[in-house]
């Protein structure tokens, strides 16, 4: 009776294990069918991660494709570098960690859709990408820092990443390296401060060195509510940081000062030349007007000379026939002659006025 009961219990245990195994397989299969949600920002970039078992698929050929119905169009295959200039899609494989990293650059709304990480044409994970428009992000900026000084990189982010860890990535040797880890700081010269109300985080770099020159990306560390699983990292803003020394800064300031001085001198010369031209023009106009007035005055003087009054005296030849024996003394009569020279010589007339004294 005991043996029979024990055998029956053993059979029940085996059945329960079998049911548990199939249940786990169904759960894993169901989880594998669901694509992880990934959100990207238009004009920005995104790093998508796919985890696999390195013992089973370590040497397999990896690819990243876009699902359309029953087909999956290859977007990129395994590359040496994650950042390849001129290519929007690139894929690297860390065989030690069993981690595929896919970078999609310059995102557009048309990039939205379902993607799949595959190894030897077998699906590893699916990702559902949604690209949205955000005015705060998707831009490129340039900043200048000086050796030994301080650089401040200010990054804005949309509200959807408000509760996720913020990151600053640096492009280096064909890869994107994070300046921070979730729990520690890689370089103590870097510090991060976040203002969630304004949706801004600021990275400060003290004691800037030549090594800090390069391209940085403001981003986030999204885990889909699973701290052990890194699903993707959106890159929001690109910053080109230029590092220069104090001498170059002073030379730049002097160059700007020279440009300002030259510009001011040229403006002064133009103003003086314009004023001199106006002055000469006024003097010429006055000279022309003075010449015309002189001619008019000369003509008037001639008229006055021509219009002068001439005085002449003539003898009186009175009638002596009545008294021939009586000779009357002759008196001089004053004659006034006035001669005018008309303006038009063709109409010249002369007038004479004579006054005779009565006897």
Image (cartoon, rainbow, N blue to C red):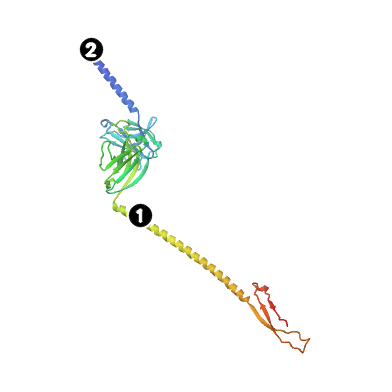
Residue 27 at what x, y percent from top left? 31, 24
Q: Secondary structure at mark 2?
A: helix
Q: Quadrant of residue 41?
A: top left
Q: Quadrant of residue 166?
A: top left
Residue at left 26%, top 16%? 12
Foreground tag (2 vs 1): 1
Percent of width and height locating residue 317: 73, 85
Residue located at (33% from left, 25% from top): 30
Q: Nearer the viewer, residue 144 or 275?
A: 275
Q: Badge 1 is on which residue?
A: 256
Q: Position of residue 216 (x, y in %)?
A: 32, 43
The label number, if any, that marks residue 5 in the structure image: 2
Q: Residue furthest top?
A: 1
- Left or right: 197 as drawn, with respect to 326: left
Earlier sequence position, callout 2 versus callout 1: 2
User: As rendered, which of 145 and 23 lies closer to the eye?
Assistant: 145
């Amino acid at each position: 009776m005991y043996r029979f009961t024990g055998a029956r219990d053993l059979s029940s245990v085996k059945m329960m294990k079998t049911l548990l195994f199939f249940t786990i397989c169904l759960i894993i299969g169901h989880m594998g069918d669901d694509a992880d949600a990934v959100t990207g920002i238009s004009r920005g970039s995104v790093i998508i991660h796919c985890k696999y078992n390195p013992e089973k698929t370590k040497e397999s050929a990896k690819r990243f494709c876009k699902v359309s119905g029953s087909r999956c169009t290859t977007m990129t295959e395994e590359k040496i570098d994650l950042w390849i200039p001129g290519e929007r899609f690139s894929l690297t494989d860390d065989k030690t960690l069993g981690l595929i990293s896919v970078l999609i650059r310059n995102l557009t709304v048309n990039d939205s859709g379902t993607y799949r990480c595959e190894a030897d044409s077998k699906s590893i994970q699916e990702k559902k990408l949604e690209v949205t428009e955000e005015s705060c992000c998707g831009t490129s900026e340039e900043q200048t820092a000086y050796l030994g000084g301080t650089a401040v990189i200010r990054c804005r982010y949309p509200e959807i990443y408000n509760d996720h860890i913020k990151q600053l990535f640096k492009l280096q040797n064909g890869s994107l390296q994070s300046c921070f880890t979730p729990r520690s700081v890689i370089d103590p010269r870097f510090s991060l401060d976040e203002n969630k109300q304004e949706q801004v985080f600021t990275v400060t770099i003290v004691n800037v060195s030549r090594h800090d020159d390069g391209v940085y990306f403001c981003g986030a560390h999204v885990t889909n509510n699973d701290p052990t699983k890194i699903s993707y990292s959106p890159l929001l803003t690109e910053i080109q940081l230029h590092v220069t020394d104090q001498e170059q800064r002073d030379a730049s300031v002097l160059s700007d000062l020279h440009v300002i001085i030259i510009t001011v001198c040229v403006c002064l010369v133009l103003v003086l030349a314009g004023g001199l031209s106006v002055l000469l023009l006024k003097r010429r106009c006055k000279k022309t007007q003075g010449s015309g007035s002189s001619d008019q005055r000369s003509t008037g003087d001639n008229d006055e000379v021509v219009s002068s009054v001439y005085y002449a005296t003539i003898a009186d030849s009175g009638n002596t026939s009545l008294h021939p024996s009586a000779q009357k003394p002759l008196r001089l009569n004053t004659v006034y002659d006035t001669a005018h020279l008309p303006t038009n010589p063709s109409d010249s007339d002369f007038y004479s006025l004579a006054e005779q004294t009565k006897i």
